[in-house]
Amino acid sequence: MDWASLNAFVAVADQGGFSAAAAQLHLTQPAVSKRIALLESSLGARLFDRLGRQVVLTEAGRLLLPRAKQMLAEADAARRAIDDLDQDIGGRLSLATSHHIGLHRLPPLLRRFSALHPRVALDLGFMDSEQAYTRVLQGSAELALTTLGPTQPPLHSTPIWDDPLHVVVAPDHPLATRAKVTLADLAAHPTVLPDAVTFTHTIVADAFARRGLSLQLRMTTNYLETIKMLAAVGLAWTVLPQTMLDAQVRVLPVAGLKLTRQLGCTVHGGRTLSRAAQAFIALLKADAR
């Protein structure tokens, strides 16, 4: 049993297939298949059943998966500890970030961090906030930079930025010229929002529910750039953060509505952070000030 084969096994299990695992690991599909075959041979047991294009874990695979993730997390922690023996900060720092933060908040921070700590290899993954939390729980990411929602131990979140949300429409939307807009006015028109399981959707839906109103959803998607486009062409109203406002959309003066989400950093409270992670968090907090 070797680390490369274990890593391939976890990737296939998490991604649900060999092709997706190969893309994640930057390998060819035959290379991933070979690693799985070597692991199955060394264990003397099949780990996956191949049902056409579908791949499912066998009983042995289900037994191995949590132990493999724990072994890989411990191996990564050992590598970080050895890297941290050097005077300069080095090693690998795995960050899971939401698309919005990655595009609108992170670029200047990444530039400064790389200049301060050139020996750190940044492993940056873009995903939904909820997926980023899962990565931290599993140990495949050391830090998650996301919209903050309710967290429970062992996760620990630190707010970094306040992120006000503005209700916007296309300049030619029926509500665009109103001097005052109510929640009832919005409820009468279709909206496009992130998926119902996201923190942002929950913030908006709760604001309407408290007033006995429901949303008229046209569709949902987790890409804010797509949401902005759909609003900008007049298909729906939506909410956008300050960093995405421009001439394509018009902010509505909605009476009695103040929507703010918090963006920040989430870590696993039961794990010791690498020096690289500690340095990155310090840079985040400095940026917040």
Image (spheres, helix red, strand yellow):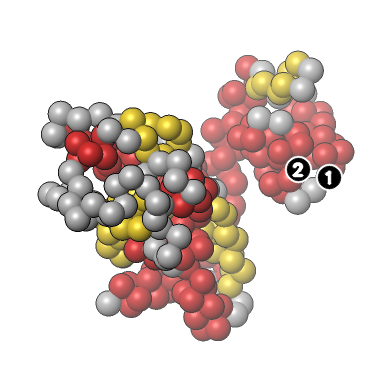
- N-term mark: 1 or 2: 2
In the drawing, does residue 237 fall left or right of residue 59?
left
Instruction: State whether residue 83 is above or below residue 225.
Output: below
Which amino acid, by three-letter code, is at mark 1?
A: Thr
Question: Is residue 225 at least partly visible in the picture?
Answer: yes
**What residue do we see at 43% from left, 32% from top?**
218
Disc ID at residue 28: 1
Q: Position of residue 68 (x, y in %)?
A: 60, 37
Q: Which mark is residue 123?
A: none
Which residue carries the number 2 mark? 22
Residue sitting nearer the eye, 58 or 55: 55
Q: Is there CB contact under 8 Å for labels 1 and 2?
A: yes
Q: Residue at x 13, y 34 (%)?
A: 211
SS for dot 2? helix
Q: Position of residue 231 (x, y in %)?
A: 44, 48
114 is higher (above) or lower (below) than 35: below
